[in-house]
Image (cartoon, rainbow, N blue to C red):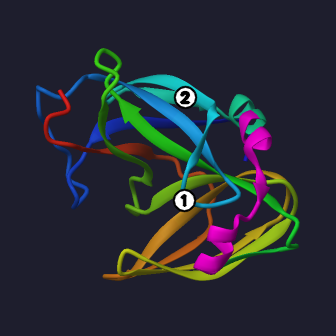
């Protein structure tokens, strides 16, 4: 995946319905960092990039700069990731998952959880850097959910992965093409004005 991704930020509820609330900021700051050697966990704060986004307006994410920061954060899977059930083949593969955090640019306080979504399918999308062609596989159990990974990576670089819901507590993560219509779904926290 090269070039850029275009998306529209918006506020949504847990059922993916748009939320209109005039007390929420009309502009947010999207902070992108990386989980080094894992899909979740602690981010590498030294590689954070901030991008302003206006709610309901198309924003462009330049992937060239993101890739450079991802390369600097990438590491082989951490002990926590492998103990959770993830495996890369070859084992020496270095990975870094992009984390998305949204803050109010005026108060610098978090606005809520943020996830890229395919608006047509309602599937969550994550951006992960892999330093070589590989496979990411495994079954992870977290927060009463089962997440099965079956990702085939054909070349080094940033890859878009989709998270498809298979049942109420079962999900499958696979490689994805870049959808035409991407949203940055923000689930607002109470008191984030």
Question: Considering only vertical position in the picture, is 48 above or below 114?
Answer: above
Q: Residue furthest top?
A: 106
The percent coordinates of residue 99 (x first, y second) are: 53, 46
> Please, what secondary structure does the residue beneath circle 1 have?
loop
Question: Considering only vertical position in the picture, is 153 above or below 73?
Answer: below
Marks 2/1: CA distance? 24 Å
Q: Main secondary structure of the magenta part?
A: helix
**In the displayed structure, does residue 149 sit left or right of residue 112?**
right
Q: Answer with mark 2 or mark 1, whichever residue precedes in sequence.
A: 1
Q: Quadrant of the C terminus?
A: top left
**Classed neighbour count for the residue bearing mark 1: other residues with Cα under 10 Å, few (<14), some (14–19), many (≥20):** some
Q: Nearer the viewer, residue 189 or 17?
A: 189
* Image-quadrant location for residue 101: top left
**Residue at x 68%, y 75% (from the top left corner):** 82
The circle drawn on residue 10 is none
Q: Nearer the viewer, residue 3 or 101?
A: 101
| Residue marked by disc 1 | 40
> Please, what secondary structure does the residue beneath circle 2 have?
strand
The percent coordinates of residue 64 (x first, y second) are: 74, 32
| Residue marked by disc 2 | 60
The residue segment tinted magenta is 69-85
**Residue at x 60%, y 61% (from the top left corner):** 39
**Residue at x 36%, y 29% (from the top left corner):** 103
């Amino acid at each position: 995946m090269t070039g850029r991704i275009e998306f529209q930020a918006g506020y949504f509820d847990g059922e993916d319905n748009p939320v209109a609330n005039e007390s929420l900021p009309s502009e947010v700051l999207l902070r992108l960092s990386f989980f080094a050697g894992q899909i979740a966990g602690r981010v590498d704060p030294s590689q954070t990039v901030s991008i302003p986004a206006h709610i309901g307006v198309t924003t462009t994410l330049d992937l060239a700069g993101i890739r450079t920061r991802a390369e600097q954060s990438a590491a082989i899977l951490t002990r926590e990731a492998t103990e959770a059930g993830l495996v890369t083949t070859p084992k020496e593969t270095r990975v870094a998952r992009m984390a998305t955090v949204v803050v109010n640019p005026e108060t610098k306080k978090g606005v809520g959880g943020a996830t890229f979504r395919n608006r047509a399918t309602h599937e969550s999308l994550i951006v992960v850097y892999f330093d070589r062609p590989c496979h990411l596989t495994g079954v992870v159990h977290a927060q009463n959910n089962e997440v099965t990974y079956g990702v085939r990576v054909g070349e080094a670089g940033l890859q878009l992965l989709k998270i498809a819901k298979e049942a109420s507590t079962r999900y499958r993560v696979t490689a994805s093409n870049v959808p035409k219509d991407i949203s940055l779904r923000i689930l607002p926290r109470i008191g984030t004005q």
